[in-house]
Amino acid sequence: MIYLNDLFPVILYILLIILVVVLIIFFIKMISTLKKVDQVVEDVNQKVNKLNGLFNMVDMAADTLSIMSDRIVSIISNGVSKLFTKKSKKREEDEDE
């Protein structure tokens, strides 16, 4: 019994030392991984900043096309409505005669 009382603390200390070493290795690898992730994020940010100008140009082109298509639709709808109003006026004049 005395032997076990002396042996358990030694085993616990050895296991604790192993655990501390494993945790230190884990944290070192985690720090290394975080540095790599930070480099990847920096690279992505640089590439996105380079593409912002392109996105602005595409946005302006889309806005211009939208304005032009709205005008074309307006012109066509006005033409169609004028065509139908002329036909209805002609029918009314024919009915009046």
Image (tube, rainbow, N blue to C red):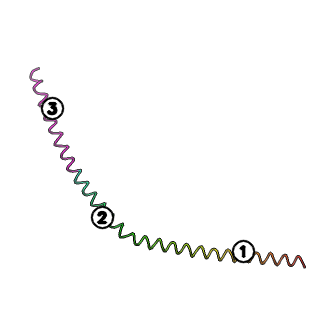
Q: Which residues are magenta?
A: 1-29
| x then y, percent, for residue 49 | 36, 68
Instruction: Name the outermost residue toward the top.
Output: 1
Label 3 is placed on what type of residue? Leu
Task: Please give the residue where the numbered disc 1 appears in the rendered image.
Answer: 81
Q: Earlier in the sequence, mark 1 or mark 3?
A: 3
Locate residue 4, reporting x and y percent: 12, 24
Q: Amino acid at mark 2?
A: Asp
For image coordinates 87% across by 78% down, the residue present is 94
Q: Which amino acid does the dot numbered 1 rest on?
A: Ser
Mark 1 Cα-neighbour bin, 10 Å: few <14, some 14–19, many ≥20: few
- From the image, tell me which residue sits under label 2: 43
Q: Secondary structure at mark 1?
A: helix
Q: Which residue is mark 3?
A: 12
Magenta span main SS: helix
Name the spot of residue 7 as percent of width and height, x first.
11, 27
Disc tally is 3
Q: Nearer the viewer, residue 11 or 84?
A: 84
Quadrant where the image shows the N terminus:
top left
Q: Is residue 97 above or below residue 39?
A: below
- Residue drawn at 19 percent across, 50 percent down: 28
Q: Name the side, left or right, on which 51 lies relative to 36.
A: right
- Residue 3's disc number: none
Q: Residues within 10 Å of mark 3 (few under 14, many from 20)?
A: few
